Amino acid sequence: MRRICNPAAAFSVFFLTQVISITSATSSLIQSVPMTWQHLPADSSGKIYVGLLQIDPFDSDVTANMIKGEIFCRRAKEMGAHIVLFPEMWSTGYTSFHHVDNDDEKPLDFEEWQSKAVGVDSEFIKNYQRIAKELEMAIVITYLEKWEGLPRNSASLIDTRGNLLMTYAKVHTCDFSLMERYITPGEGFFVCDLPVGKDTISVGIMICFDREFPESARILMLEGAEIILTPNACILHDRLIDQFQTRAFENTVGLAMANYPGCKGRSCAFDAGGEEILIADESEGIFLASFDFTEIKTKRRRTIYGNAWRRPLKYKKLISTDYDSIFIRNDALGNRFDREER
């Protein structure tokens, strides 16, 4: 079994000591909730601290989730985080909808679910831009993004000045899931430079199912990513954790993943050599992952992995759309999955 949350590596963890209660109609400020944590060590210079927000949503209540997310951003800042990472589709708590042909009833119908999508110019995003600027802390906020046609499953990176640097939409939508079959897939993988104190680090984003395809992290590495941030919303058994760790090792990049608590949990981080920084338990809280900025760059200069000894001209089959019939699959609607259409 995996070790669960190495406190010496994580440095600090928030644990809820009482229940926060928010109704769907609330507009009042949530009162402070007592929590305990360890302070950063004295030799924390030269480190980049990523706060993994392993927190429970208030179902699909966008306003309540926005308020709770703000509170946890502020607490992450008190812990010393330079960047905070939300779990997948935080705005709606990764809440699905029910379908007329599906017996698995969900709280929302399709129209209600789609109406909860927010744009990059929405108050939801602008609020986190204000917080990032005020706290001088970068934020990766995740949400159901309003889009022409069907919404997207997106994550936006906001810098310490409140600027929206990049919005990434999940490429590998889980089309075997009803909700994600109604998501517009992203068009590609992107990397941008994020100033962190006196340093600048190249950041990439992939979301949940993306990490299960080696191509996702590989492309981000080829685009120059030094750290890949990964919002998540699924159960992480040992093999999926191992798989994620391998992505760090084979690409020589730092990796951090934020998941929801409870039966999911196990938010985690690995350094650019694939060494474990932390694996959380299932508790709700903020798990702080420490990345050594200098070490990342040194390992990238010396590695035999990443893009050091690749032979790309031999990999043409990787971009072929041909496939063996054994891999034909139907999506959640019963239609054959079309690799070129989706």
Image (cartoon, grey):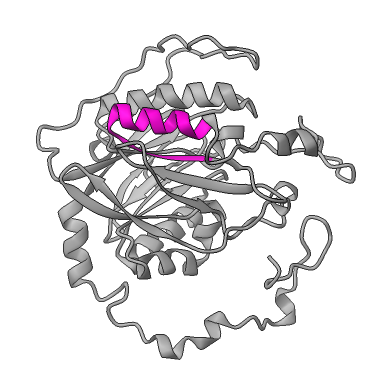
Tell me: 319 left or right of 73: right
Which of the 4 quarters of the picture holds residue 287?
Answer: top left
From the viewer's perspective, is 270 left or right of 88? left
Residue 126 vs residue 80, the one in the foreground = 126
Residue 315 visible from this viewpoint: yes
Depth check, front residue: 13 or 222? 222
Outermost residue, front side? 121
Relative image position of residue 12 (x, y in whole percent): 28, 30
Residue 294 location, quadrant:
bottom left
Looking at the image, the residue that sits furthest to the right is: 101
Residue at x 30%, y 74% (from the top left corner): 305
Can residue 213 be found in the magenta stretch?
A: no
Q: Quadrant of the C terminus?
A: bottom right
Q: Identify the residue at image location x=65%, y=13%.
A: 25
Classify 39 as above or below 194. Answer: above
The secondary structure making up most of the magenta span is helix
- Residue 299 image offset from top left, x and y in percent: 20, 64
Point 84% across, 60% down: residue:
334
* Image: magenta residue range: 124-142
* Residue at the extreme bottom of the image, as rendered: 314
Q: Is residue 134 magenta?
A: yes
Residue 283 shows up from this direction:
no
- Residue 11's place in the image compared with 185, above or below, is above
